[in-house]
Image (tube, rainbow, N blue to C red):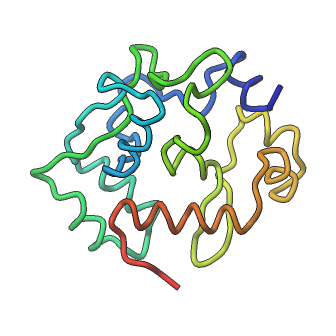
Amino acid sequence: MSACARCALRCGTCCTLRPGDEEFCFPLSHAERKRMKAAGAQARHFVRQDNTQAFVGNIKRLFPDEGAAVEQLFPPASAHDRLATLPDGACALLGPAGCTLPREARPLYCRLFPFWIRAGRERYFELDFCEAQREASGGAGLKKRLGMTSADILQLYHELRTAWGLPERT
């Protein structure tokens, strides 16, 4: 059983938000929704979320040098699609052994997490509750545990940027 599946059985994983923090859930592109629906996701798995100031601020933290582009993509009088959550904060697609969607159909952010690219360098979000991080010794071990390579991480990051409408960065 994978570290993520064990984590799902134990605590709900990174696929669970604190109730009340739903506005901070990452956005979904049209292409991501389409791919998810083709794999079995239904309308109830998605919601429209207003582009709140807090949401935009959170996205700006992910892309710290691209505030103007983020504000243009997520204007205050508009909304974006995101994953639906249950009353306890769990993603509506989270099952007892992890995500109910096949990996290739999951949102790009989910497939990339906990990795990220900042200033051209590979990073990962450090999480106290992450089984894979506890079992790994640093980024190389974490990639191995999650079955990812640096090339995978970079590819997913660029796909995510494109899907969300951010300009390509070299």
| Residue shown at 77% from the left, 61% from the top | 149
Report which quarter residue 157 is drawn in.
Answer: bottom right
Task: Establish if 107 lies above or below 115.
Answer: above
Percent across and percent down for residue 61 are 44, 60
Q: Nearer the viewer, residue 152 or 104?
A: 104
Horizontally, residue 167 falls left or right of residue 119, namely left
Quadrant of image for the N terminus? top right
**Residue positioned 72% across, 31% down in the render:** 4
Would residue 9 appear left or right of 141 to someone viewing this image? left
What residue is rendered at 83% in x and 38% in y?
Answer: 134
Residue 48 percent location from the top left of the image: 23, 36
Residue at 58 percent across and 70 percent down: it is 118
- Left or right: 170, with 34 as reference point: right
Farthest residue, direction left: 77
- Whether 39 is drawn above or below 69: the answer is above
Left or right, residue 56 beside residue 18: left
Answer with the quarter of the image where residue 165 lies.
Answer: bottom left
Of all residues shown, which one is farthest toward the front? 38
Image quarter of residue 128: top right
Label count reads: 0
User: Image height check: is 94 above or below 139?
Assistant: above
